[in-house]
Structures are given as C-alpha cells and as structure tokens.
Image (tube, helix red, strand yellow):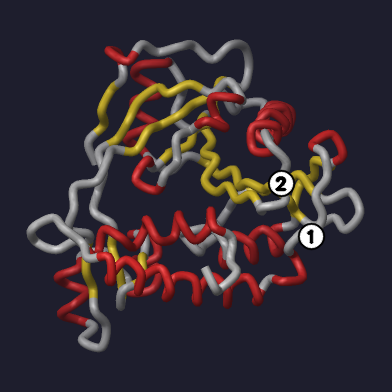
Amino acid sequence: MKHQVPTRALSVRGLLHLPLLVRPDGRVSRRDVADELHRTADRLRDDLRSVDALIPRDEFPLSDLRFVRLKNDVADEVFGRLHYLRSARAGSVNFALVDPLSGRPVTLCSVSPLEWMRVGRQLQKQFGVPLGAAYDVSRVYSFDVAPPNAISCLLAKVRQAIRQELPSAQVLTTAVDPNLGFTGASYRSANWRQWMSITARPYLYVDGLYASPRQLRTRFGGANLAELGAANRSHRFEQSRVRLLNSVIFCCRLRGVTEHVAPDDYRLLRR
C-alpha cells in the first residue's frame, strides 16, 4: 500500500466500511474494495499525522514497558484519531503500557462503567453480579511497535488496578466484534472467558463514514436513520446491507477464578 499506513489498522477500518459496499445480490466488486481501501488509507494517514507526537517509535521488550494511569487528554487523542470508532468513551479511566524513555503509550485501554443494561441484567441473573458492579473495557488500541502479548499483559495489570481502586467492582466485560477480524485471543490469554453473545445490529454510516449510534445521538440528536435523513437533507444516512456476525461478550472476575461457561450455556442476548 503506497500510503505507508499500519496494515492492521487499515484492515480493521476497511472491514468496518466494507458492509456498505455489498450489492443487493450479496456481491462486492474488487474495484469498489480497492477504492474504499485507498480512501480509508488516506484518512488513516491524516489521523496518524495529527497525533504524530504521541506515536511511539522504538520497540522494547514487554518487561521494559511501564504500566501507568494514562492522562485523559492523551487517551482521548489516540482513541479519537486512531481507534476504529474514532472516539473516546466519556467518563473512562485510562491505562497504558508506555515506552520507558519517551513515556508514549504503546498499548492502552479505557475502562468505563458498564452501560449496556442487557448485559448487566444477564450478569445479575446468570452470574450473581449486582447492577453497577461491572465495568467495561470499552476501548483498546495497540501500536505496531507493541511486543507480543502486550494487550493481555495490560489487561492483567488493569484487573489488579481496578480491584484496588474500586472495591465494589466485581467483573470486567468487553464486546468483541468478529466482523472486524477480532477473535478475543488477547482476552483469552489474560484468562477472560466468553460468557454470552449479543445479536449484531447493522453498521450505520453518515456520508459514507461509519458512525456508532452513540455518535449519531451526540451529533444529530438521534439514531433513527429515516428520521435523521428527513431532518438533515445535506447528509446521507445509510446502514450495512449484509448480515453480520454476533458480538461476543468476554468477562473476567476481579477476584478469584473466572468460571468457564460451556458453549451450550452461552446466552444470546437480543438488542
């Protein structure tokens, strides 16, 4: 790719926008894919330039990276520009493994109170986790210089930190979207377990760019595409046209062993 952007980040962003290109017959042209990848690479290159001062340059072994509570302004810049959602989660606390010389984040994540009530109620019903005692790893980003196992190492340290800082917290959760190539391998390596899954919803787009329902509500005051289209004629609102895979919910007990759930016992939650 002539744009010289990270392949992994380009792949995730490309997969996020690919469902918009699918034709009614279920096919997508190679030309459409190539054009989208070039547009995506251009946007990613601009985003990288905008946070150039925060990008780590050197590779270090995992044992040399320092675990820190990351300043919100730094995390917001990285997540707002480089995470595939291009947004930070308000009200989060942020942690990172940082370069021991420059202090730049190599691998970082956000932890937020769990707002997904369907998941919260299922945790209460099936696993005895009180409402308000679950926290969500809502954002994760790892630069290309990160050593192997950086994310799973960060997750283990975050578990310790949250356990100390929030005595009432019982469980960490996260949602893994397999449509973007994510498998949850780093969570499994950190001894998280799949506890449930949740039905996929169509990806939403404004003027050809992905926007989450939260972003639509913040920007336009709602997430109903028909209503938004009628009220905002200068914008094009669309949704993906292909069936998406369900998201997987991984969980980790903050104290004790996280119990294994057999596949037959996974609950599929409806949105």
Q: Which residue is drawn at 43% across and 16% down?
A: 128
Percent across and percent down for residue 102 are 88, 58
Q: Are marks 2 and 1 in contact (CB under 8 Å)?
A: no
Residue drawn 53% across the image and 41% down it: 113
Q: Residues within 10 Å of mark 1 (few under 14, many from 20)?
A: some
Residue at the farthest bottom position: 234
Instruction: State the SS at label 1.
Output: loop
**According to the image, label 1 marks what residue?**
57
User: Residue, x 14% and y 70% (percent of image)?
Assistant: 226
Q: Where is residue 141 in the image (x, y as percent from the top left)?
A: 60, 50
Question: Is 24 placed left or right of 238 in the picture?
Answer: left
Q: Looking at numbered disc 1 in the image, what kind of residue is underneath it?
A: Arg
Q: How many labels does the image show?
A: 2
Q: Furthest residue to the left?
A: 25
Q: Residue 38 carries which label?
A: none
- Tag of residue 146: 2
In the rendered image, is residue 166 in sight?
no
Coordinates of residue 51 in the picture (x, y in percent): 68, 71
| Residue 186 position (above or below residue 214) | above
Q: Which of 107 and 255 is in front in this view?
A: 107
Q: Which of 240 and 211 is in front in this view?
A: 240
**In this picture, is 220 found above or below 20?**
below
